[in-house]
Amino acid sequence: MIPLFVVEQFSDIGWLSRRRIWFPIFLIWLILLPIAILLFPIFLIGCVFTRVNLIRGTAACLEVLSALRGLEVEVQKSDQQIFISIK
């Protein structure tokens, strides 16, 4: 399943303030859908030139998108900390 939300959490190390932001990725998927439809012929031509099976190439792209679910990234700086989680 393609991830639907991204949770981004900011926290200042020196202060006790924490902010958590939820981004609905499914709205971004709706915006990117027409672009994906327009780019599909280029993907098809690329599969033909590289001799990759179209079904396997499409399945690989969908597997990469679905593997993003559960991804967690944590970045620390001397005064701030950022934690990003894809749900």
Image (cartoon, rainbow, N blue to C red):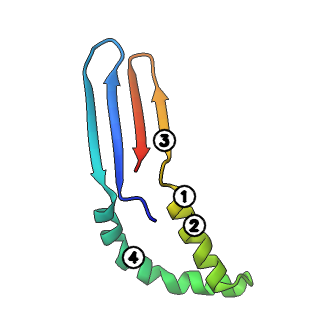
Decide which of tag 2 and tag 3 comes sooner along the chain: 2
Residue contact between numbered discs 2 and 4, judged by CB atoms under 8 Å: no
Residue 4 lies in what quarter of the image? Answer: bottom left
Q: Residue at x 42, y 82 (%)?
A: 37
Q: On residue 63, which mark appears?
A: 2
Residue position for label 3: 72
Q: Secondary structure at mark 4?
A: helix
Q: Residue at x 63, y 77 (%)?
A: 57
Q: Secondary structure at mark 2?
A: helix
* Residue sitting nearer the eye, 25 or 34: 25
> Marks 2 and 3, Cα distance to the nearest angstrom?
18 Å
Give the total of numbered labels: 4
> Marks 2 and 4, Cα distance to the nearest angstrom?
19 Å
Decide which of tag 1 and tag 3 comes sooner along the chain: 1
Residue position for label 4: 35
Q: On residue 67, which mark appears?
A: 1
Say which amino acid is labelled 2.
Glu
Residue contact between numbered discs 2 and 1, judged by CB atoms under 8 Å: yes
Residue contact between numbered discs 2 and 3, judged by CB atoms under 8 Å: no
Q: Residues within 10 Å of mark 2 (few under 14, many from 20)?
A: few
Q: Residues within 10 Å of mark 1 (few under 14, many from 20)?
A: few
Residue 46 lies in what quarter of the image? Answer: bottom right
> Marks 2 and 1, Cα distance to the nearest angstrom?
6 Å
Say which amino acid is labelled 1.
Ala
75 w.r.t. 60: above or below: above
Q: Secondary structure at mark 3?
A: strand
Q: Residue at x 73, y 81 (%)?
A: 50
Decide which of tag 3 and tag 4 comes sooner along the chain: 4
Say which amino acid is labelled 4.
Ile
> Marks 1 and 4, Cα distance to the nearest angstrom?
21 Å
